Image (tube, rainbow, N blue to C red):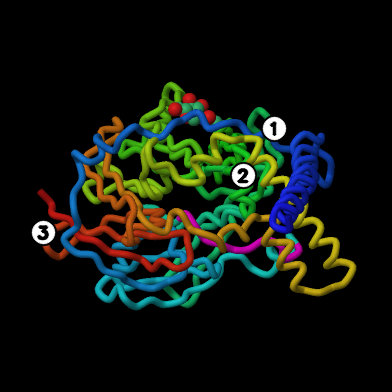
Amino acid sequence: MACCDCLRKILNFCFKYSLVFGVIAIAIIFAPSANYLLDIEPRPLTVLLPNSLRQFESKKVEWKSFENAASIVGPDSIAYDPKANRLVTGSDDGYLYSIDVDDDGNFKKLFQLVNDELMARFQYKRRPRPSGLRFDSKGRLFVCEPMFGVFKVENVFTDKPKIELVFDIEKTSKLGPTSVRQEKPSGGHIIYVSDVSSKFSFQYVTAAILSSDSNGRVLRYDTETGKLDILMSNLFFPNGLEMLPDNRGFLLTETGNRTVWKYTFDDREARVLMTALPAEPDNIRLSLDGKTFWMALLRPRTRNDPLLIDHLMSFPMLRKLLVRLFDMIGTLFELLHRLTTISKLQCLSRQFGTMEILNKGKDEFATGGMLIEFDSNGQIIRTVYQTEGIENNLAWATEVREMQSKNLNERLLYIGSFRPGYPIRKITLDKK
Ligand SMILES: *[C@@H]1O[C@H](CO)[C@@H](O)[C@H](O)[C@H]1NC(C)=O
C-alpha cells in the first residue's frame, strides 16, 4: 500500500541518516584533539540547583519604583565619582560613558581606552569592552578591559584624560605555577584580577562555560614592584571581585559554579561563602552603608524547573559535541573565507567559533533576574527578584550600584547589564 510504503521510506531515510549523524557525533566526541578538534573535557556540573527558593523568599522585598535610566548599550559596570557627582560606565561599543546623577536619563559618550597601537598588536582581532570599573580614593578610575588588561584613567571627566595600561594581559600568559617578578616603574596599586580562563579568550565565554573549563584564576598584581601572584586557581568562570570593608580579603563570584568565595589575606585561605545559588552570580559591590554587599544574578530557578542550560550541564558529552562542532564549523567558514574572500563567511566563522550564533535563538535569561544583599558572613539580608513570566525588569542584571537617595526613607539602586538591549535600570526600595 502506498501509505505504508511511504512511511517505510521515511523511516528508512531517518535510520540511514541517523546512523550517519550518530557516527559523526561519536567521532567528534571521542576523536583525540587535533588542530581541527578542540582539546576539551567537560565534566558534569556538581553544584546542584536549590530545592526551593524558600531562604530567598523569606527575605524578598518589592521595589517602590522601577525606572529605565540612560539607555547605553550594555552598561556592564557602574562606578560613581562623588566629587563630580557623575556615574561612569563602559558600553558594548567599547566606549566609556558618563551620566550626571541629577539627570540620569541622559548620557555623554567619553572615549575608548584601547588605542590603535594596542589594537594593532593583536591584528585588530580583539575587541575593546570596558567591564569592571571603580574609582580609588583620589578619583582615579580603574577599568578592566578583558582582552587587553587593566587601565588607569586620571581626569576622566575632562577633555584631557590620562590613560595608562597598568596591567597588561600578556603578563597572565607568561604565568607559571609560581609567581613571576617584573620590573615596573612606581604606581602604587595592588590590583586583583579574575582571569576567566587560561585556555579560552574572552570572546569564547559560551565555549568556556559549556566545556566547564576550570582553568580560571584570581591574580594579584603590584603595580609598584611588578610582582604577580596567583591567589586562587581551578575556578570555573571566576568573575566579580570586591574587597572586604576592612581590606583584609575579598569576595569572589565563581559564576560557572554558582558559588561565592571569601578569601582572607592573613591565612591565605579561600572559603565557600555561598554555594548552590539559584542562578549564576556576577558582580558584587559594597552597599552604601559600607557593611553589606549587593550581588547581581541571572534568572533564579530550582531543581524542579531547570532551564535548558541546566540540562546541558548534566550532559558533558553533549556539550563536548556542541563545542567541538561549532568550533569546526567556524574553522570551515574561515577556510572558505580565505579561499573566496567573501566577508560574510568571516562573520559566520566568528559567530560559530564563539558560539554567538546561539544567542540568536531563545534567550532563557530574558525573563527573571535576581539581586541579593548579604553580609561578609554570607548571611542574606534582602533579595529582589523575578523568576519568570513576561516580566524582564531584572533580566541580565550584572551589577548593582547603590546610591544615596534624595528621599532618606528610600534606598536607590542602579542596575547594570553586560547584555546589549538593557539600559541602566533604577529601582528604589523601602529602607526599613
Ligand atoms: C565549585 O564549588 C564548590 C563549592 O560548592 C567547590 O568546592 C568547587 O571546587 C568549585 N569549583 C569547581 C571547578 O567545581
Mark 1 secondary-structure assignment: loop
Going from N to C along the chain, the mark reached first, 3 or 1, is 1
Residue denoted by label 1: 176
Q: Residue 347's image quarter?
A: bottom right
Q: CA distance from mark 3 to mark 2?
A: 44 Å
Residue 330 x %, y %: 75, 57
| 330 and 272: which is toward the camera | 330
Q: Which mark is residue 222?
A: none
Residue type at the position of mark 2: Ala
For the residues labelled 1 and 2, the Cα–Cα distance comes to 21 Å
Quadrant including the N terminus: bottom right
Can residue 135 be seen from the camera position used here?
Answer: no
Indicate if the residue with disc 2 has its beta carbon within 8 Å of ligand 1: no
Are dots 3 and 2 in contact, CB under 8 Å? no
Whether 126 is among the magenta residues is: yes
Q: Which residue is mark 3?
A: 408
Where does the magenta region start and end? 123-132
Residue 208 — which label? 2
Residue in the picture at 71% in, 65% down: 348
Q: Nearer the viewer, mark 3 or mark 1?
A: 3
**Does the rendering let one see residue 405?**
yes
Question: Which amino acid lies under the numbered mark 3 shown in the image of this protein?
Answer: Leu
Residue 222 position, x and y percent, is: 54, 41
Give the CA separation, mark 3 to mark 1. Answer: 51 Å
